[in-house]
Image (tube, grey):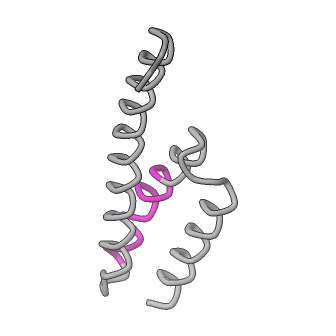
């Protein structure tokens, strides 16, 4: 329980941001999962730039670490090149 109005506001802001971040992180994870389940190379190459942009946006806003973003993008590229 917050002892100050500012602490109460901070809790509200944190919860709102947490929900926002969770939504975008989950949406990106689902897009990555869909891409990795694709067996058609043309479809995978078409969706790759969209997924990369999603990952970059998460890294830019510090929802995920930039190194994690780089590792995810590298893994996706390796997968698509093997198709």
Residue 18 locus on image (x, y percent): 41, 39
Residue 47 placed where, x, y %? 36, 63
Q: Residue at x 50, y 57 (%)?
A: 52
Figure check: 8 above or below 47: above
Q: Could you tell me which residue is drawn at 56 percent across and 69 percent down?
A: 72
Task: Please report the residue visible at 55 percent of the width from the left and 75 percent of the height from the top.
Answer: 77
Which of 78/14 is in front?
A: 14
Is residue 6 in the magenta section?
no
Residue at x 52% of width, y 44% of height: 57
Question: Where the C terminus falls, by quadrant?
Answer: bottom left
Q: Residue furthest bottom?
A: 82
The stretch in magenta equals 42-54
Quarter of the rendering occupied by the N terminus: top left
- Residue 42 in the image, given as x and y percentages of width and height: 35, 76
Figure check: 7 above or below 59: above
Residue 47 lies in the magenta-colored region: yes
Looking at the picture, does residue 32 appear above or below residue 6?
below
Q: Nearer the viewer, residue 12 or 3?
A: 3
Q: Main secondary structure of the magenta part?
A: helix
Specify the quadrant of the image occupied by residue 67.
bottom right
Residue 37 is left or right of residue 6, and the answer is left
**Residue nearer the viewer, 24 or 81:** 24
Q: Nearer the viewer, residue 4 or 66?
A: 4
């Amino acid at each position: 329980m917050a002892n100050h109005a500012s602490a109460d506001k901070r809790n509200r802001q944190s919860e709102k941001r947490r929900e926002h971040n969770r939504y975008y992180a989950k949406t990106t994870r689902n897009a990555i999962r869909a891409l990795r389940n694709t067996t058609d190379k043309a479809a995978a190459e078409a969706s790759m730039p969209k997924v990369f942009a999603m990952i970059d946006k998460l890294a830019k806003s510090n929802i995920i670490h930039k190194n994690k973003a780089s590792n995810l993008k590298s893994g996706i590229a390796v997968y698509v090149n093997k198709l």
